[in-house]
Image: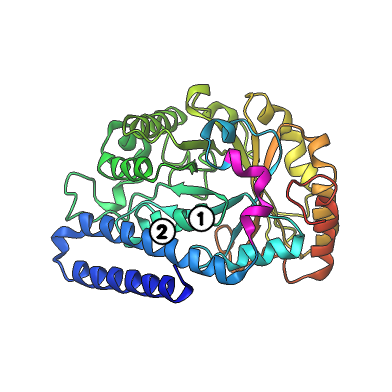
Amino acid sequence: MKRSGRLMVAIATVTGATLAILALTSLSSESAGPVTAMLERIGAGVGALEHGVRSRTRGADRATRLAWFAASRGNRALLAKPDSVLLGAYDGGIPGTLEGVEQLERTLGVTLPIVQAYGAWGEKPEQQFPARLLTAVTDFGSVPLLTWEPWLVDFDARAHPELPLREQRDAHGLAAIARGDYDFYVDAWAASAARFGRPIMLRFAHEMNDPYRYPWGPQHNTKEEYIAAWRHVVERFRAAGATNVVWIWSPHVAYEYWDLYYPGDTYVDWVATGVLNFGPIAQWSRWWSFDEIFGSKYQKLASFGKPVMVAELGSLAVGGDQAAWYASALRDLPRRYPAVKSVVFFNTEGDRTVTYQSVDWTITGDSVTRVAIAAALQPWAPGRSR
């Protein structure tokens, strides 16, 4: 087909999808569930088309640079037992664009086989199964890693009168998940994941042992309730045929007894934790090196016999030498920590997750830090530019 013909097909497809979306959005709110799912499927198709057009016009074939990863990208079993370190990133432009990931790749001289996104439970359109985003990441040549956060207050009490009032849902909310009270949502995601078919890495209810940050923490739930909820969710996905999901268990290792939250070998594929150096920006924080945060916990993380992931790697520039921090963290990492099979950069600005002030984790704006990271990765990172 000539280029003009392909362009006409693309325009017709986008136009048809747009009209379908307009028609569907005119339906009543009573159809919100089916409509949202249909919109997401249409959006996934349009997103794949958009990405294909953009990929051809961009010129650079990213898939070629990820040829070493091609077999693992579509194979869940290989993703659960990787033979090299899989680099990745979360960028603040996600889910709107993957351009920040591309910029980070150019900056660091590597191509990233994992792209992370975050998603909260609820009934808003952005809280449904993100088929369009996952399609874009997969077509991009990477595997999507989704941190899936079970916020329970966003479900409409009118649509779900069987649920407790919003202000009561966090109390033993994980027990409610384990009982099946939220299966209407879990099952919808599981069915969508099964339809998607390609591997998805799912980091569910992360940092469940942190008593301050998230409502699924120990201030509202017991560790037994957490384990029961985790197993229930995994079992619902498997029952729906979503065997393409790779399950990432991710405690906060700064707190004691985090290992007691382990759901069991048959329910976990990877063990993960975040390594974020906040420096002296808060009373509870100081400048910690990567080895101080991670090194003392490494043996226990590795003891589960699963590949280990650093699911959020970052250092602020306040209070120390940011470039030296990254260089020390990444230099010769596979030799020092052989069980670590993935490192995911946390590249975002405006983060207010932990502090009242907005903090900036980006690394692309500082040339000294960029050079230091690229130099540390060059000897060992798969897919590095030569």
Amino acid at pointer 1? Asp
> Relative to residue 143, is residue 112 drawn left or right?
right
Does the magenta-highlighted stretch encompass residue 279?
A: no
For the stretch drawn in magenta, what is the main secondary structure?
helix
Mark on residue 271?
A: none
Locate residue 197, reporting x and y percent.
41, 41
Q: Nearer the viewer, residue 332 or 211?
A: 332
Mark on residue 132?
A: 2
Name the residue carrying label 1: 139
Compared to residue 33, the image places residue 356 above or below, namely below
Residue extent of the magenta highlight: 61-72
Locate residue 317, reporting x and y percent.
76, 65
Q: Split into 4 quadrants, where in the image is the N terminus? A: bottom left
Taking the spot 52% from the left edge, 34% from the top edge, the residue there is 76
Compared to residue 29, the image places residue 244 above or below, namely above
Spatial CA span between label 2 and label 1:
10 Å
Q: Quadrant of residue 125?
A: bottom left
Amino acid at pointer 2? Arg
Query: Label 2's element?
Result: helix
Taking the spot 37% from the left edge, 30% from the top edge, the residue there is 238
Q: Is residue 321 visible?
A: no
Badge 2: few (under 14), some or many (20 or more) residues near its Cα, within 10 Å?
many
> Relative to residue 17, is residue 258 drawn left or right?
right
